[in-house]
Image (cartoon, grey):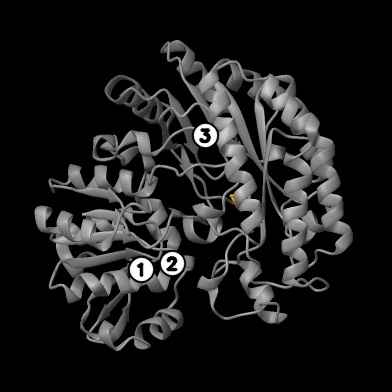
């Protein structure tokens, strides 16, 4: 049985660990890791159950009913830095209810000391045995299911009898083994597709892996740390087969192609777009890109193949901050990429972060001015939430920038860091101010409403606007 636990409306998507209650312009995504793992487990001859209990409508009782009906031998769940304690308590409650399945937890942010501190603090945890997987779960899951404890390859902590056993932690070893093409088609019939919909049209949307891992050195990002510094690409044919399955078997025509940088290999992108057209697939899709890894030819091919939105991790409108965070891009490159995308008629989504250690009043105002000038279709403004293992976590520790040790009490909208010159309260105020100044511009609202042709989309925009105002008030 694979699940996301009912411990919060939380996105548990590897490097994107986000409290969805705080999101301004996004909806809940399919639990993509669980889906692919479910396919893998099924292909090994196991019966598999898959449950996303992240939605607020689920409780522990729902989980218990499903466990009693399915009687799993193994229980796998994804945990995050922001939900680790409630997730451990959830697991302990299941054990206290007498369920004695074996637990596997994906927890890429833990190291031995952190685990020990978390587990030893809780006496009721002594009787639980659990595997903590700290890197890609595919190989570990395959081997553990086939051979049990002897099958563990690497990157695993085993908690048993109040002690931690460490298995070799070498990420690249695991990476070389598992090929994304080895994923069977994920069993989407195990989820309710209407739980995962586009924010504008309300139509079901599928999330499909095209690659994993990233070679860039961005100090705040966990992708190179948790998923590897080399890009593990999936073949075009394999991705197309999954799209066809979604279209023909599940009636899903909207997609988000999930990779750390979708446009990393131009040849791959052009071939992918050509395949979509050759197969006659009429789909609408979005993806993400680095601003220095996209050009006019790619963007035009993507548009022809149905791409209607591209997300860019622009992070900051200040070149000084971009340099400090090792993003390896400039504001000039952001502008150039944005121009290509706009000219091709594709919507743009800028993901930004304010409150980096080096941010000042001036750099944050620079970011605000930059966003207003560029005026992408959507923005998200986050504050840094350093994940354990990242360079930013180490920098913040070294300079005493954490305002608390309680990582779970903070988030991407509630700053846990002060900068060298700003307080967390000042950063929070700037966040609200930027969002308000961006989304509440009369011209922006007017042009968005004028661009809507479909009444359903109009209603969804109105609902989204009301939710946005509520979130802003609570932020
Ligand atoms: S480019 Fe930077 S932010 Fe984007 S996935 Fe790679 S390391 Fe992370």
- Which residue is rendered at x = 68% and y = 75% of the image? 396
For marks 3 and 2, give the one nearer the viewer.
Answer: 3
Q: Earlier in the sequence, mark 3 or mark 2?
A: 2
Q: Quadrant of residue 430?
A: bottom right
- Which residue is rendered at x = 24% and y = 40% of the image? 190
Question: Height in image: 13 above or below 298?
Answer: below
Query: Which mark identifies residue 199?
Result: 3
Distance, label 1 to label 2, CA atoms, is 6 Å
As drawn, is 221 to the left or to the right of 316? left
As drawn, is 380 to the left or to the right of 194? right
Q: Nearer the viewer, residue 378 or 289?
A: 378
As drawn, is 388 to the left or to the right of 422? left
Q: Which residue is mark 1?
A: 87
| Rendering coords of residue 121 (x, y %) | 38, 88
User: Do callouts 1 and 2 mark residues in contact (Cβ within 8 Å)?
Assistant: yes
Question: Height in image: 392 above or below 19?
Answer: below
Distance, label 3 to label 2, CA atoms, is 25 Å
Question: Height in image: 46 above or below 117?
Answer: above
**Label 2: element kind:** helix
Q: Earlier in the sequence, mark 1 or mark 3?
A: 1
For marks 1 and 3, give the one nearer the viewer.
Answer: 3
| Rendering coords of residue 405 (x, y %) | 57, 81
Mark 1 crowd level (few <14, some 14–19, many ≥20, 10 Å Cα): many
């Amino acid at each position: 049985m694979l699940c996301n636990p009912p411990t919060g409306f939380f996105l548990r998507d590897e490097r994107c660990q986000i409290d969805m209650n705080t999101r301004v312009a996004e909806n809940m995504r399919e639990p993509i890791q669980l889906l692919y793992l479910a396919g893998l487990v099924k292909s090994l001859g196991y019966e598999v159950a898959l449950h996303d209990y992240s939605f607020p409508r689920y409780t522990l009782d729902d989980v218990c009913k499903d466990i009693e009906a399915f009687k799993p031998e193994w229980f796998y769940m994804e945990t995050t830095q922001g939900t680790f304690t409630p997730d451990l308590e959830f697991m302990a409650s299941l054990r206290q209810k007498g369920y004695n399945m074996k637990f596997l937890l994906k927890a890429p942010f833990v190291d031995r000391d952190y685990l020990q501190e978390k587990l030893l603090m809780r006496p009721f945890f002594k009787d639980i045995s659990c595997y903590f997987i700290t890197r890609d779960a595919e190989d570990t899951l395959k081997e553990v299911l086939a051979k049990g404890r002897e099958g563990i390859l690497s990157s695993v902590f085993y908690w048993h009898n109040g002690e931690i056993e460490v298995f070799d932690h070498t990420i690249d070893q695991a990476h070389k083994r598992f090929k994304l093409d080895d994923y069977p088609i994920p069993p989407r019939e195990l989820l309710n597709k209407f739980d995962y919909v586009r924010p504008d049209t309300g139509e079901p949307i599928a999330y499909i892996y095209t690659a994993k891992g990233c070679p860039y050195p961005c100090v705040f990002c966990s992708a190179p740390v948790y998923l590897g510094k080399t890009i593990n690409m999936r073949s075009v044919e394999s991705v197309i087969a999954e799209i066809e399955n979604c279209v023909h078997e599940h009636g899903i025509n909207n997609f988000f192609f999930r990779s750390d940088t979708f446009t990393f290999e131009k040849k791959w992108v052009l071939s992918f777009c050509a395949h979509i057209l050759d197969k006659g697939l009429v789909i609408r899709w979005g993806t993400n890109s680095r601003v220095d890894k996209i050009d006019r030819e790619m963007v035009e091919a993507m548009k022809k193949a149905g791409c209607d939105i591209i997300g860019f991790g622009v992070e900051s409108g200040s070149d000084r901050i971009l340099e400090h965070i090792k993003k390896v891009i400039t504001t000039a490159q952001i502008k150039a990429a944005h121009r290509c995308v706009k000219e091709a008629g594709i919507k743009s989504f800028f993901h930004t972060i304010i409150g980096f250690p080096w941010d000042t009043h001036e750099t944050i105002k620079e970011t605000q001015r930059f966003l207003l000038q560029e005026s992408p279709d959507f923005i998200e403004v986050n504050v840094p939430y350093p994940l354990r293992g990242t360079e930013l976590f180490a920098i913040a520790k070294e300079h005493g920038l954490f305002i608390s040790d309680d990582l779970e009490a903070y988030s991407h909208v509630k700053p846990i860091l002060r900068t060298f010159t700003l307080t967390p309260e000042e950063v929070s105020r700037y966040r609200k101010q930027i969002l308000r100044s961006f989304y509440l511009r009369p011209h922006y609202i007017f042009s968005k409403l004028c661009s809507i042709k479909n009444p359903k989309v109009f209603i969804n925009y109105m609902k989204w606007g009301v939710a946005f105002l509520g979130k802003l008030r609570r932020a």
